[in-house]
Amino acid sequence: MLTRLGCRVLMFNQKMWLFLFMTSSIYHHERGFSSMSAEEGSSGNVKKQSTLSHGGLATASPLVGLPEFSHLGWGHWFTLRDLEMATNRFSSENIIGEGGYGIVYRGRLINGTEVAVKKLLNNLGQAEKEFRVEVEAIGHVRHKHLVRLLGYCVEGVHRLLVYEYVNNGNLEQWLHGNMHQYGTLTWEARMKVILGTAKALAYLHEAIEPKVIHRDIKSSNILIDDEFNAKVSDFGLAKLLDSGESHITTRVMGTFGYVAPEYANSGLLNEKSDIYSFGVLLLEAVTGRDPVDYARPANEVNLVEWLKTMVGTRRAEEVVDSSLEVKPPLRALKRTLLVALRCIDPDADKRPKMSQVVRMLEADEYPFREDRRKRKSGTASMEIETVKDISGPSDAEKMVISESHVEEG
């Protein structure tokens, strides 16, 4: 049995471990993307080209039992008791999500704040690994379209992460699941969610250093708030990529149907893998179909291959989700399909950057017109490249373009 002094020493060692982990953790700094970071995101207490200081007094917590030095720039340090109280002792009635990583509970802190508490399963150290990954990836970045990590808990074998609660389900639920009972997402709402997701990925890939590769972009990881803003969540598989690295080699992880072919085949990972997954997500939003659906005829099981076939046979208008009461304008549909086809290009080098994707989605013209002008947004690296700057269109893209030009003529 541990003595009272022994318990104190054990608790101190746990706190010191987390403090050392946090202070030695890789930190992010923002690149010179003034337009992106000013409007959409920041890295909290991390200023450009600077590390964090831990010399001052910590922010006091309104929560019972919280250590004095609980605020290190990454959020509050919660005790297990705090989170038990918030979730009614981790009641099954509070469960809002679960998977191989653990269980997510809805909770309410004693100050009234609603939170999502992710309780990681301690499977052969997996909880420890995921805890480190998520804290390193998004522990102190801030962006309108990233779910915010509010704090964490480390006690004994317990590893918990506390996020803001996003109250309107996720994109998968709205397209395929129980949120569908409240109505069908309009085209405008879908594109708002897609654009928000694109902005979040552009921020993670291009505006901070080291860049963050999410590695599991899919509809269930795109949370939606009550104004239909996207919040990218679940960074348990994320990887960090330094500016000097073109890629890293890692075990293939992700969700079948969303994983980029070159990553699945070789294990070589960079931001182009996220861009492919985003392209699949965009097609999912347009069509209302799952990326892989074995309930469909054999030639329609794989969404990407089916879409390419439909576009290649000049049937692009038929791919729109049949549940949409108001179909999108043909021009908007074809522009969106062109962007998606760009993102799922089998040649990873031909996929656009996410900042380019954002501009394409926001533009009122086709992404592949011959236009040598470049829009600048603060730095040369944010220039929006034209068709000649990126690469030529694929055969499927040419079919969409040729149809569009006929209509405009």
Image: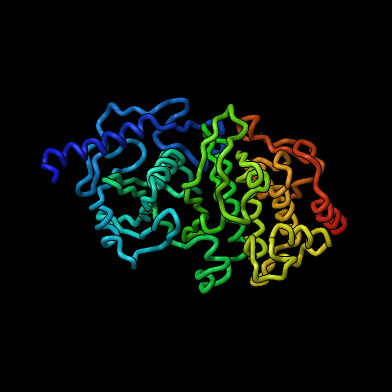
Q: Is residue 353 left or right of residue 12?
A: right
- Residue 340: x, y in percent? 69, 52
Residue at left offset 47%, top offset 58% = 225
- Residue 327: x, y in percent? 69, 67
Residue at left offset 51%, top offset 50% = 232
Q: Is residue 394 left or right of residue 238?
A: right
> In this view of the protein, can residue 149 be seen by the observer?
no
Most extreme residue toward the bottom, as rendered? 181
Residue at left offset 84%, top offset 57% = 403
Question: Height in image: 116 above or below 247?
Answer: below
Scheme of colours in the image: rainbow
- Residue 319: x, y in percent? 72, 65
Question: Height in image: 327 above or below 399?
Answer: below
Choose between 256 and 80: the one closer to the eye: 256
**Could you tell me which quadrant the C terminus lies in?**
bottom right
Residue at left offset 82%, top offset 42% = 370
Choose between 7 and 318: the one closer to the eye: 7
